[in-house]
Image (tube, helix red, strand yellow):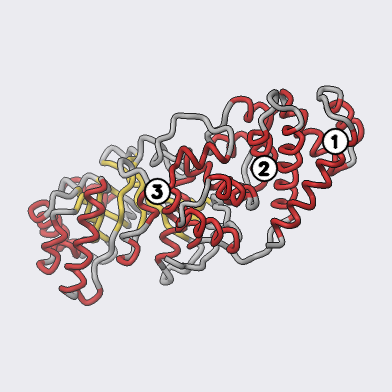
Amino acid sequence: MMIKEAIDAISIARQPIFDENRNVVAYELFNRSNARDSHTVASDISLALNAIVNNGSPIFTSSTDLFVHALHDGLAGPHWEFLDPKSVVVTVQTVSNHDPNQIANVATALEELRARGFRLCFNYAVVAPPYKAWQAFADFVKIDLAAVTVQQLKPLVAAINTRTPAIAIATKVETVEQFKQLKSLEVKRFQGYWFSVPEIIRPRVLAPSESWAIRLFNLVSKAAPIDDIEDCLKKDDALGVNLLRIINSAGFGLSQKVTSLRQAVMLIGYEKLVKWSALVLATSSSKKPSLLTSSSIVRGRMMELLAELDRPNLDPDTAFLIGLLSQVDAMLGCPLQSALDQLSLGDEITDALLNEGGNYGAMLTIAKACESDDESQFSRAFSKLNFTLRQINVAQMKALVWADSALST
């Protein structure tokens, strides 16, 4: 799946779905980065990635379902491996011209999604005879009030109840009269401006550079040594951050804290890493690395080199990860605490990033001070560590050369 559509910034709208007591039971996501009529497989993947890495606020909560859209060509793909089927409902449109061959082909993909545990939602056309193969798969069926007359409502609800096991969802509900009529027909789910207008949210998925995304995909496809994969992850901050966010997602179900990129690779395993790298490749960017990327990689490498001088008191892999994540709030466009909540990090790492606590925190302070020539900040941190001025200067120079080589690839 080679889809070149970078998604380092994405505008998403979510609209709640209510029960008959006006309690929110689900949210539906809409990609507003594209025009309404330019819905693509790539935009579906962008939406899915946001659902994956934003497991919780601001996308949805653990007590609500999440409705995401999928074109027929996007019903299969690696992104479904990382979504949590317990909370995700896949909305699928009916077939253009109701072509029986295409309906049959899509039915196979729908059956596979159901086997994974996903629930499915269709529009009301699914009750028509050509879609008999789909009807048993329906968990929800939408009734578009803008397209259905008042006289058609009662027989349509009856058809949904008799031909499918689905819960009907009335959409585009705009008046209290419509709500009352639908309740009298025992419709149980509602969506529309009378309840709530769509809320625009703008979560951010970091787009790795195309060159490093290709390199990662090639490495994991060939089951390369973990050292080579770790080195690749270190040289693109978006790769490392996105891997940590994936591991922290509900679909992955990790309970263990991560202390290094090497550990993250071992936890996700090669089989899932191949599928995740395919997603990364589909959404990589050809744009040049930012100054933010450069400084994060320099900090990580500098801290790694310093930690190598003080083994076993300091772990170089942990030191690198702290430096790499030292600007994760700016990368993700949110407060630092919120950014760290999206990652599964050990307490020592979190303390270093939030409070610059411990020896790793002092090393991070030194790395920052070297960038800004802040002598007072440098002196306070320097007194806590066992490094000479020469060791720090050499580490910084080596880190700059290493990062420059990585970012010019």
User: Few, some or many C-alpha atoms within 10 Å of disc 3 (few <14, some 14-19, many ≥20)?
Assistant: few
The residue positioned 25% from the left and 45% from the top of the image is 117
The three-letter amino acid code for the residue at tag 3 is: Glu
Label 3: which secondary element = helix
**239 in relation to 385, above or below:** below
Q: Is residue 132 left or right of residue 82?
A: left
The quadrant the N terminus occupies is bottom left
Tell me the CA gap for discs 1 and 3: 40 Å
Camera-side mark, 2 or 1:
1
User: Few, some or many C-alpha atoms within 10 Å of disc 1 (few <14, some 14-19, many ≥20)?
Assistant: few
The residue positioned 42% from the left and 57% from the top of the image is 30
Residue, disc 1: 391
| Picture quadrant where residue 386 is located | top right
Residue 271 is tagged as 3
Residue, disc 2: 324
Query: Looking at the image, is mark 1 or mark 3 earlier in the sequence?
Result: 3
Residue 134, how many percent across, how many down?
16, 60
Given residues 119 and 385, the one toward you in this image is 385
